[in-house]
Image (tube, grey):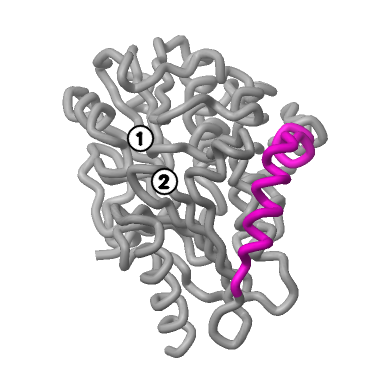
Amino acid sequence: MRSADIRQASFEEIAEACRAYDGFSICGHINPDGDCIGSVLGMMWMLEAMGKEVQPLIALDGPLDDAIASMPGADALVRVEDARSMPAFITVDATADDRLGERAASLRTEAGLQIVIDHHEVSACGADLCRIDPSAASTTCLVWELACMVGGVASPELATCCYTGLMTDTGRFQYQNADARAFRLASQMVEHGADVSRISRAFFQNKPLAALRIEALAIERLELLGTGDIAFSWIESEDLQRLDATRADCEGIIDALRSIKGVRVACVLKDLGTCVRGSLRSKDGTDVSAIAARFGGGGHKAAAGFTMERPLPEAISIMKAALTEAEAR
């Protein structure tokens, strides 16, 4: 079964369900990115404009990075471990329980209504109402389309959150998913008050010095695999301590590797101590989500991630072999 085979709820059905309930939890995947938090906060602004009680959740092991914290409504985010049960639960930018984490998945099970809004290709969705559209450039595109259908809720704050998710998930409108629909919706968001310059500064022109140092280290370790078109590097847990860097400071590394001339696939491994987190990007149509899926991960054709419960040296060896094998196919 593919996403297209799942019974898709219309925006009208989701809007009607939102009108029928008074209290909502909204949550995305573990260690959320801009699209995930943009979707959570976008839904929060929409539901609050409808007069609903909203509990926007975040499943994050560590502090919010500055860019995410700058989003309107970020100060209302509730850590999942501190959350309470609500009558309805909306999952955004994720579908399966293992992407939510144990606590959020438990809260979802307790809810009387479960809604999923996502743009990832999935094989199943057990929620009461599912809107899964892999053709959408970001989940915030779907949140925006829902809000526009509801009417009267498209505030500057909602537009800013939705634009943030769209901008980050299209790599500043550089990835293959930056299609006509994405630009059309971005234009609508700007018309409703999204401040493009401010959002861009917060996410792409506000790097701490530690982020540049960790990026330089990753580039120093760079290896070109296969025929030289696969860029591979890694960050050790000790590197973060030594350079006074955070996990968030590593986010730009994958794009730096992807930007190298002649490189079509990039991979970065980050040692988190208890596990290794991998990021994959492609710029030629290579489906990196298929590589990530081999290790229990997923994502999009051009951008994916995974987690390995292995020591870093072992993970490096496994990934080098997997990337080289994928190139040979």
In the rendering, at what x and y percent does residue 107 appear?
23, 24
2 or 1: tag closer to the N-terminus: 1
Q: Which residues are magenta?
A: 201-223
Q: Residues within 10 Å of mark 1 (few under 14, many from 20)?
A: many
Question: Nearest the camera: 267 or 300?
Answer: 267
In the rendering, at what x and y percent does residue 251 appear?
59, 46
Residue 191 visible: no
The answer to whether the residues at label 2 and label 1 have Cβ atoms under 8 Å apart is yes
In the rendering, at what x and y percent does residue 101 appear?
28, 35
Left of 30 or right of it: where is 301?
A: right
**Of helix, strand and loop, which one carries label 2?**
strand
284 up-or-down from 97: above or below: below
In the rendering, at what x and y percent does residue 64 appear?
54, 26
Chief SS of the magenta region: helix
**Mark sitting on residue 91:** 1
**Residue, x 53% and y 39% (percent of image)?**
247
**Residue, x 36% and y 53% (percent of image)?**
307
325 up-or-down from 72: above or below: below
**Residue, x 45% and y 56% (percent of image)?**
278
Question: Nearest the camera: 28 or 251?
Answer: 251
Q: Residues within 10 Å of mark 2 (few under 14, many from 20)?
A: many
**Three-letter amino acid code of the residue under disc 1:** Thr
34 in the magenta segment:
no
72 up-or-down from 98: above or below: above
**Of helix, strand and loop, which one carries label 1?**
strand
Q: Residue furthest right?
A: 197
Question: Nearest the camera: 63 or 219?
Answer: 219
**Mark sitting on residue 118:** 2
